[in-house]
Amino acid sequence: MRCQDVLCIDSPSKPYPKLVESNIDFLRKVLETGEGRVLDIGAGHGRFVKLFYEYELPVRRYVAVEPCTEFTLDLLDALDWLKADIDAEALHVDRKWQEVRSELLQEDWDIIIAWDIFMYMDLRGVHSTDSFREAVVREIAELIRRCRVLLLSFWPDRRGLPGVNGYTPDGRRSYRMFTEIVQDALKLAPEGKIYAKFHHQNYIIVNTEELEF
């Protein structure tokens, strides 16, 4: 499989991220004081959609980008819950992020979710670089600029792009690399500050120009 193909990696049984659940009141406040706009990149089976629904977060517009048809049924069911019970505008964009990012990043978002996606995404063409890693750094910096809060995570997966994840069996090299990627992205977008993190690969990043911190 070429690296630019959709890898269709997700699991309906993945637990909700502990870092996000433990900061749910913070995310509620972010949505309440903003416009309630959420962009979910690589939404998979819709676990974040379900999380926002189950905690009744005040979402008004939720856009889930997910090109893999294997996840569509679960994702659409989750989006229907938002539409019916929270009365939110909930949309599924069934195209690759690289194809729609320019359009979607013209909008401003309260929360952007980029959870366990960059290990499988080739953004070199988007950012005009030969380096997988540099493309990810630039993309994270751009996401920070386009939202108030970024939910960001990495995962060392053999099936991903080795130029990004630097996979090793014990994961220590990968975790160090993830930390360095985030640090480099924050240098490009100094308005971004880490609000919370869990281990070395899960982050909540706040845009201090858009949200008091």
Image (cartoon, rainbow, N blue to C red):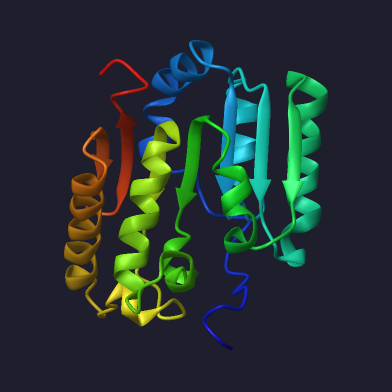
Q: Is residue 111 above or below residue 184?
A: above
Quick check: 51 left or right of 196? right
Quadrant in the picture for the C terminus? top left
Q: Residue at x 73, y 20 (%)?
A: 86
Quadrant in the picture for the N terminus? bottom right
Q: How many marks?
A: 0
Spot occupied by residue 122 in the image (x, y as percentages of width and height) = 48, 72
Q: 43 and 125: which one is in front?
A: 125
Spot occupied by residue 139 in the image (x, y as percentages of width and height) = 40, 55
Q: Is residue 121 above or below residue 26?
A: below
Q: Could one spot residue 18 in this view of the protein?
A: no
Q: Quadrant of residue 180?
A: bottom left
Q: 122 and 57: which one is in front?
A: 122
Spot occupied by residue 120 in the image (x, y as percentages of width and height) = 48, 71
Q: 81 and 143: which one is in front?
A: 143
Taking the view exactly as shown, the residue that stands out farthest to the front is 128
Q: Quadrant of residue 116?
A: bottom left
Q: Residue at x 81, y 54 (%)?
A: 73
Quick check: 65 left or right of 152? right
Taking the view exactly as shown, the residue that stands out farthest to the bottom is 1
Spot occupied by residue 67 in the image (x, y as percentages of width and height) = 70, 62
Q: Is residue 191 above or below residue 125?
A: above
Taking the view exactly as shown, the residue that stands out farthest to the top is 33
Q: Residue at x 74, y 24 (%)?
A: 88
Quick check: 138 left or right of 159? left
Q: Residue at x 46, y 51 (%)?
A: 115
Q: Could one spot residue 39 in this view of the protein?
A: yes
Q: 104 and 118: which one is in front?
A: 104
